[in-house]
């Protein structure tokens, strides 16, 4: 309804120079016909404005596996023959439970967000790059990883700086955040993006069903259509804001589209090269990751892998030394200069005006919040989380109830547009600072019922019948609001006594209820998607005359329709019989 309302970190883990050159060179040489999305330039190191202006990235721009898909297609043509090493066939295999999770997520999104056009192969490509398909499918029967899959702590030491946001609930780290699980969500993103994909009542980033569904919803936000290359690029960059990452995911996506198959859990191939120079994502110390098999990846295939070395907290490897602290409780580095987040003292309304929209419409005004120091100075580069509270079906554009936006150079974060649901009344939206305990700032948005300001008949035929008969022409009207179609608007139709007396008449035309009894007031009517309202058939009792039908809608639109009932014709008396002679 109401078309007039228009219904409808910077990359923290910087790739080393050698790795960047290798990825760029190999990317250019592989998978003929795959879009390169432009050659790498100096601008590639700068985050996309579309991404940095929204909610950062799913992974906090954590490191990822850089192994490329094999040169051989998983389904080679007959003329080329099978791959001598069988490498394409091996790499195309996805562990059974992991593959099932991707396909179930696609099916769920096809139903809940059909306009997104999410292919399960995209989830497979991201799952491959983020965790090597849950470390080759090392999951239990419910899809939960055997041991946690953790990225390096995001302590600013070669990575983005994201201080703890979950008190270590997901990553076991109460100092800094770490990417968690097979799809490598950081805790602050999982807090709003998490989903229950296996219907067990929990949202667990370590469960492949939950993580795959969450990744699907994450990629489908902002009304992105993933069949459109521009939207697909934005979605992938929002997951990890790196041009190299985008190109790599696109290559695995095209590779899996050419063919894949199921392999037993725990037997999938493992990648061995990571964007920060490390050997892969860390895991729970109680269940260390299985070393990659020689020749398992498309990059460096056939070369023996050295024995895994313990990882440094910030990525890379080091010579083993006796541990001084438990691996799961990394010691934070000495205190450094305060981050922008550390300097925030309070939040201020940055000029959000009265927020009102009719049910089903997009709010024309958007919430804006300014982060300030104690002295009132604006603070840039601070993440503000906007959360819609309470029992409401109002969401942000894209269907989410939470959005995280970074403040700009003026310290202002502007939330995505609100989309009013069908539940009317007040809606509370709370703004909070991610990573710092600061009093939240509440905004109130009001959803009003759908309304019309004009009603008009769709035809001009006279509405007449004879007493005791029925009207042949149905009454149909069209509702509009400020000239646009007004759909779903509540309406009432009453056969009134007169223009001055709008009480229901006790004689004349009438409708019939479900039991066939006469009624002269119909409530609970609604206009259809085209703004049309077609009333049920009208009947006439034995009273002749002119009568009035009054139709009213929410918003004050009123239309009075005239009905004419003609007296029933009486038959002429039969002539008297002639007297007999």
Image (spheres, helix red, strand yellow):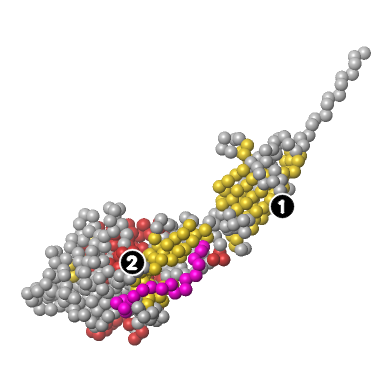
Residue drawn at the location 69% of the way across and 50% of the way down? 560
Residue drawn at the location 62% of the way across and 47% of the way down? 493
Nearer the observer, disc 1 or disc 2?
A: 1
Q: Residues within 10 Å of mark 1 (few under 14, many from 20)?
A: few
The N terminus lies in quadrant: bottom right
In the rendered image, the residue lying farthest to the top is: 581
- Is residue 294 positioned above or below 113 on the image? below
* Residue beneath disc 1: 460
Q: Earlier in the sequence, mark 1 or mark 2?
A: 2
**Residue 547: image x %, image y %?**
72, 44
**Occupied quadrant, residue 510:** top right
The residue stretch that appears in magenta: 340-357
Residue drawn at the location 47% of the way across and 55% of the way down? 423
**Occupied quadrant, residue 455:** bottom right
Q: Give yes or no for contact between labels 1 and 2 (Cβ–Cβ under 8 Å).
A: no
User: For this rendering, which residue is in front, 480 or 333?
Assistant: 333
């Amino acid at each position: 309804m109401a078309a007039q309302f228009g219904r409808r970190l910077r990359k923290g883990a910087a790739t080393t120079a050698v790795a960047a050159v290798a990825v760029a060179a190999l990317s250019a040489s592989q998978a003929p016909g795959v879009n390169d999305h432009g050659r790498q330039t100096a601008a590639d190191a700068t985050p996309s404005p579309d991404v940095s202006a929204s909610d950062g990235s799913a992974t906090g721009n954590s490191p990822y596996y850089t192994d490329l898909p094999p040169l051989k297609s998983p389904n080679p043509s007959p003329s080329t023959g099978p791959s001598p090493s069988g490498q394409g066939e091996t790499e195309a295999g996805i562990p059974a439970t992991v593959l099932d999770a991707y396909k179930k997520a696609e099916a769920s999104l096809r139903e809940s967000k059909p306009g997104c056009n999410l292919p399960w192969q995209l989830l497979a490509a991201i799952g491959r790059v983020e965790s090597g398909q849950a470390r080759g499918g090392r999951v239990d029967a419910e899809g939960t990883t055997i041991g946690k899959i953790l990225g390096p702590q995001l302590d600013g030491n070669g990575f983005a700086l994201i201080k703890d946001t979950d008190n270590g609930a997901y990553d076991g780290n109460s100092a800094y955040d770490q990417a968690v699980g097979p799809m490598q969500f950081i805790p602050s993103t999982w807090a709003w993006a998490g989903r229950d994909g296996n219907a067990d009542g929990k949202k667990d980033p370590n469960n492949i069903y939950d993580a795959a569904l969450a990744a699907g919803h994450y990629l489908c936000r902002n009304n992105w259509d993933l069949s459109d290359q521009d939207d697909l690029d934005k979605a992938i960059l929002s997951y990890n804001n790196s041009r190299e990452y985008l190109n790599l995911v696109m290559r695995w996506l095209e590779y899996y589209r050419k063919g894949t198959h199921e392999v037993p859990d725990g037997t999938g191939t493992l990648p061995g090269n990571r964007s920060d120079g490390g050997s892969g994502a860390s895991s729970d110390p109680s269940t260390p990751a299985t070393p990659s098999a020689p020749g398992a990846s498309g990059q460096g295939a056939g070369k023996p892998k050295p024995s895994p070395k313990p990882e440094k907290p910030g990525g890379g490897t080091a010579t083993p030394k006796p541990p001084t602290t438990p691996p799961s409780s990394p010691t934070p580095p000495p205190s450094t200069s305060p981050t922008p987040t550390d300097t925030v003292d309070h939040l201020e309304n940055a000029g959000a005006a009265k927020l009102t929209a009719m049910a089903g419409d997009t709010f024309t005004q958007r919430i804006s919040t300014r982060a300030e120091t104690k002295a009132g100075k604006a603070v840039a580069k601070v993440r503000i989380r906007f959360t819609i509270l309470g029992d409401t079906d109002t969401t942000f554009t894209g269907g989410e109830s939470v959005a995280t936006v970074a403040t700009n150079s003026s310290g202002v974060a502007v939330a995505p547009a609100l989309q009013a649901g069908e539940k009317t009344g007040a809606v509370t939206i709370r703004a909070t600072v991610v990573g710092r305990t600061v009093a939240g700032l509440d905004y109130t948005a009001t959803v009003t019922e759908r309304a019309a300001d004009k009603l008009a008949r769709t035809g001009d035929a006279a509405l007449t019948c004879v007493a005791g008969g029925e009207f042949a022409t149905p009454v149909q009207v069209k509702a509009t609001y400020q000239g646009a179609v007004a759909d779903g608007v509540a309406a009432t139709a009453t056969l009134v006594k007169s223009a001055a007396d709008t009480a229901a008449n006790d004689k004349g035309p009438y409708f019939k209820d479900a039991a066939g009894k006469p009624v002269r007031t119909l409530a609970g009517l609604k206009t259809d998607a085209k703004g049309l309202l077609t009333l049920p058939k009208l009947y006439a009792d034995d009273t002749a005359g002119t009568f009035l039908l009054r139709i009213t809608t929410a918003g004050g639109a009123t239309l009075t329709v005239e009905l004419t009932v003609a007296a029933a014709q009486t038959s002429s008396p039969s002539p008297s019989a002639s007297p007999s002679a």
